[in-house]
């Protein structure tokens, strides 16, 4: 895998991690209810699930590509359409992120870890997200090093991003400002998702 290809993967993983969704809601919930440590534990448990999905998706797409390039391209196109749909939904949102910033009752670190792992492993949207994104990187992952980069890059980026979220939200002055910008966050996320879908289609042309 070349440096430019990896940087492209890195950028997409960053944008994917930053997209609002149930994962953000879970990390925010445990951060606000249990404190910074709960949020960090939830974040890295979530990232383990992301790594599992990344590995499964990579191996599955590689097998499909080897068996039938046409099916592989069809999966990539369907994934791109799904990303575009998510983007359109976010653009039409009335501030859904604001609802994700509500506090909850405090729980144990074990529960925070369990919820973080579960929200990633049992969220089929994450699998679809990887199917849409990884199609453009499978060809670049012909070596063990390349495959390791494709798996660990989203895992580490996801963990780091939600760790940042946990640290930021643990400051009491930050949450009100995020609530004020809820609609803007949704709009920006929608634009990013639509651009990602266009990128996937472009790589197939």
Image (cartoon, helix red, strand yellow):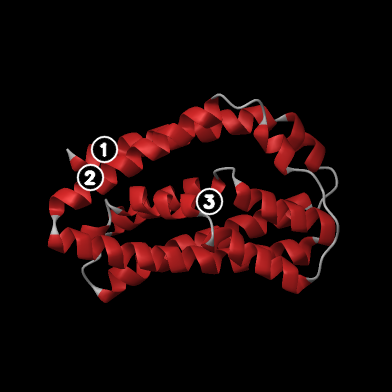
Which of the pair 77/139 is nearer the observer? 77
Q: 10 Å neighbourhood of mark 2: few (<14), some, or many (≥20)?
A: few
As helix, strand or loop, the secondary structure at mark 3 comes to helix
- Residue at 58% across, 62% down: 159
Q: Which residue is mark 2?
A: 74
> Of callouts 3 and 2, which one flags the residue occurring earlier in the amino acid sequence?
3
Quadrant where the C terminus lies?
top left
Mark in front: 2 vs 1: 2
* Inter-mark Cα distance, 2 to 1: 11 Å
* Inter-mark Cα distance, 3 to 2: 25 Å
Disc number at residue 17? 3
Residue 200 vertical placement versus 184 (above, below): below
Which of the pair 126/17 is nearer the observer? 126
- Residue at 19% across, 51% down: 71
Mark in front: 3 vs 2: 2
Disc number at residue 201? 1
Which of the pair 142/72 is nearer the observer? 72
Q: 10 Å neighbourhood of mark 3: few (<14), some, or many (≥20)?
A: many
Which of the pair 64/144 is nearer the observer? 64
Q: Position of residue 203 (x, y in %)?
A: 23, 42
Q: Can residue 140 be seen in the rendering of this structure?
A: no
- Residue at 24% across, 37% down: 202
> Of callouts 3 and 1, which one flags the residue occurring earlier in the amino acid sequence?
3
- Residue at 54% across, 31% down: 90
Q: Position of residue 36 (x, y in %)?
A: 78, 62
């Amino acid at each position: 895998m070349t440096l430019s290809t990896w940087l492209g993967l890195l950028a997409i993983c960053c944008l994917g991690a930053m997209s609002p969704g149930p994962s953000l809601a879970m990390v925010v919930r445990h951060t606000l209810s249990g404190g910074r440590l709960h949020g960090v534990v939830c974040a890295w448990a979530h990232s383990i699930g992301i790594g599992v999905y990344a590995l499964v998706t990579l191996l599955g797409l590689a097998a499909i590509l080897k068996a039938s390039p046409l099916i592989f391209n069809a999966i990539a196109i369907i994934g791109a359409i799904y990303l575009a749909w998510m983007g359109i939904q976010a653009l039409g949102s009335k501030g859904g992120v604001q609802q994700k910033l509500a506090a909850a009752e405090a729980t144990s670190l074990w529960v925070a870890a369990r919820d973080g792992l579960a929200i990633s492993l049992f969220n089929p949207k994450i699998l679809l997200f990887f199917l849409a994104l990884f199609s453009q990187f499978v060809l670049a992952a012909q070596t063990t090093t390349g495959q390791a980069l494709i798996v660990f890059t989203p895992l580490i980026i996801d963990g780091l991003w939600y760790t940042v979220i946990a640290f930021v939200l643990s400051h009491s002055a930050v949450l009100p400002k995020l609530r004020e910008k809820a609609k803007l966050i949704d709009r920006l996320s929608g634009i990013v998702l639509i651009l990602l879908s266009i990128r996937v289609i472009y790589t197939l042309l």
